[in-house]
């Protein structure tokens, strides 16, 4: 028997309230896919570049890989470090859905970051030599896939060390206009 306790106002809970669960930190094959993309990027880098100029190209790739790696992995590691104590103590970490300015700022930053990652290579194409452009694009791909790969490995190691499996959950309902309204979300631990 599963007992569900909500943080939200009890008057918001409706008969048609649903709970969705999924893997944490993402899709269950995310580690493998991120590792394959990271490996293919490294192999492509090794095969395409001239050994005489590899240091210049490697520095370009490293500089291009750092911003996406840090922008994705640092918030994930800090957030997980914060919620891991809650998960160990109570088996669950949950947050009520917050509306307001903070959420709008996060959404705007995500959109800006997305456009930089997507449009950045196209802009670089016009201003840099092809070798530098390719090294920077491969660096961005390595940074993105590397951040997901290493965070997923960290989560798997943490789960093994504590004997649990983490699952993401979302509690939601449909309002009068048939829109999905999220009440709360979080991560819970299930014993293995």
Image (cartoon, rainbow, N blue to C red):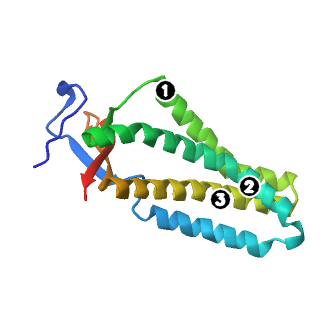
Q: Secondary structure at mark 2?
A: helix
Instruction: Label 3, secondary structure: give it.
Output: helix
Residue 72, image x, y percentages: 57, 46
Q: Residues within 10 Å of mark 1 (few under 14, many from 20)?
A: few
Furthest-front residue in this view: 161
Residue linked to disc 3: 141
* Residue at left offset 55%, top offset 66%: 35
Q: Nearer the viewer, mark 2 or mark 3?
A: 2
Q: Vertical placement of 117 versus 175: above or below? A: below
Q: Is residue 165 left or right of residue 80?
A: left
Closer to the chain start, of discs 2 and 3, is 2
Question: According to the image, label 2 marks what residue?
Answer: 62
Q: CA distance from mark 2 to mark 3?
A: 11 Å
Q: Position of residue 27 (x, y in %)?
A: 41, 59
Pick the front one: 178 or 81: 81
Residue 179, can we see it? no
Mark before the other along the chain sequence, 3 or 1: 1
- Residue 142, given in percent of the width and then of the height, sits at 65, 59
Q: Quadrant of the C terminus?
A: bottom left
Label 1 sits on residue: 102
Give left or right: position of 106 versus 22: right
């Amino acid at each position: 028997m599963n007992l569900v306790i909500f943080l939200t106002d009890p008057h918001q809970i409706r008969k048609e309230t649903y709970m969705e669960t999924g893997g944490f930190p993402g899709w269950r094959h995310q580690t493998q896919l991120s590792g394959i993309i990271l490996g293919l990027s490294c192999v492509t880098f090794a095969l395409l570049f001239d050994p005489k100029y590899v240091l210049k190209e490697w520095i370009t790739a490293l500089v291009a890989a750092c911003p996406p790696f840090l922008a994705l992995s640092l918030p994930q590691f800090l957030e997980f470090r914060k919620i891991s104590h809650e998960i160990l103590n109570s088996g669950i970490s949950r947050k009520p859905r917050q509306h307001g300015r903070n959420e709008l700022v996060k959404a705007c930053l995500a959109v800006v970051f997305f456009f930089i990652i997507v449009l950045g290579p196209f802009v670089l194409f016009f201003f840099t030599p092809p070798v530098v452009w390719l090294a920077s694009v491969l660096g961005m791909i390595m940074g993105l896939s590397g951040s997901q790969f290493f965070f997923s490995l960290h989560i798997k190691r943490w789960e093994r060390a504590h004997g649990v499996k983490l699952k993401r959950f979302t509690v939601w309902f449909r309002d009068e206009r048939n829109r999905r309204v999220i009440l709360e979300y979080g991560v819970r631990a299930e014993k293995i």
